Every structure is written in C-alpha cells, then in structure tokens.
Amino acid sequence: MIELAKIALADELFASRIYSMAAGIGRERSTGDRLLKISEMERGHAEFWELFLRKRGVDPSEVGVSFLKTAFYAVFLRLFGLALTFRLMESGERDAVELYSRMLESPELDKDEKERIRKILEDELIHEQELARRSRGLRSF
C-alpha cells in the first residue's frame, strides 16, 4: 500500500504542475481558470497522500516528480498546445482511476481513507472526461 500511495502522490503532484502550466497557455480566460481549479484539486489530492504516508511513518518529501517528465510535457505543451497534451494526459488519468479502484479493495484502509479515495476517484473520472472532450476540440472548460 505504501508503494501505491507513493505512486499516487507523484502522479498528483505531476498533474497539478501540468494543469497549472496549461492554464497559462489557453486562449480563453475560462479555460485557464478551469485548469487552475483542476490543478488545485490535484494538489489537494497530493496533500491527502502526503498525510496518508506520514500516518504510516513515511516521509512524503522522498517522493518526487520526474524533472524529465515534467520538462517533456512542458515542451510538448508549448509545441503542440492543449488538445494534444490533454490526449497524453488522458492515459495518466485512466491509470489513476485504475490505481484508486485497486486501492479501495485493500483492508489496510480505514473508513475515512476509503471515503476520501472514493472522492478522489470521482474527481479523476471527471478530469478524464474533461480531458477527452477537450482533446477532441469540444468545449468542456
């Protein structure tokens, strides 16, 4: 469970950074505002995983976000724009949904943790749908 939580933390921190970067790229203010809101939601998810790890005696500062992965996405975002970047990010959201679904089956989680992970899972499903619509050129933000 600890390793899964570390993966979840790294993924949430990464997503928060990318959504924040993407917010500055959008032509429409409403798109930027929505992306900043998603970035903040992802940061909130990361805070949950930080607390989750601390509760289990793990220092969350040991979990980092790959500089190369972040740099790649930043360059990709600048070169190809939001739509193609969101296509790339869709798979990350799908992976998060699968990870959280697996985690919910664990007996190691208490009731409050399961409830919080369910809420995070709902958020990730919404993000996946928004990314899919946005990457296909439909307005969703």
Image (cartoon, grey):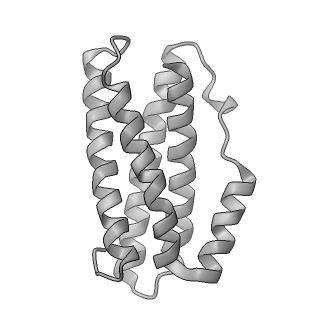
Q: Is residue 120 above or below residue 49?
A: below
Residue 127's x, y, as percent? 34, 58
Q: Is residue 66 above or below residue 56?
A: below
**Residue sitting nearer the eye, 69 or 26:** 69
Residue 74's x, y, as percent? 65, 69
Residue sitting at 49 percent across and 63 percent down? 19
Task: Answer with the quarter of the image where residue 6 lies.
Answer: top right
Q: Residue furthest bottom?
A: 27
Task: Answer with the quarter of the image where residue 29 lies.
Answer: bottom left
Residue 61 in the figure: left or right of residue 1: right
Residue 140 in the figure: left or right of residue 48: left
Residue sitting at 40 percent across and 86 percent down? 28
Q: Is residue 20 above or below residue 51?
A: below
Residue 45 in the figure: left or right of residue 122: right
Residue 84's x, y, as percent? 51, 75
Q: How many marks?
A: 0
Residue 88's x, y, as percent? 52, 64
Residue sitting at 43 percent across and 50 percent down? 42
**Residue sitting nearer the eye, 94 or 82:** 94
Quadrant (top left/top right/bottom left/bottom right) for the C terminus: bottom left
Task: Answer with the quarter of the image where residue 100 lies.
Answer: top left
Q: Is residue 114 above or below residue 67?
A: above
Residue sitting at 26 percent across and 39 percent down? 119
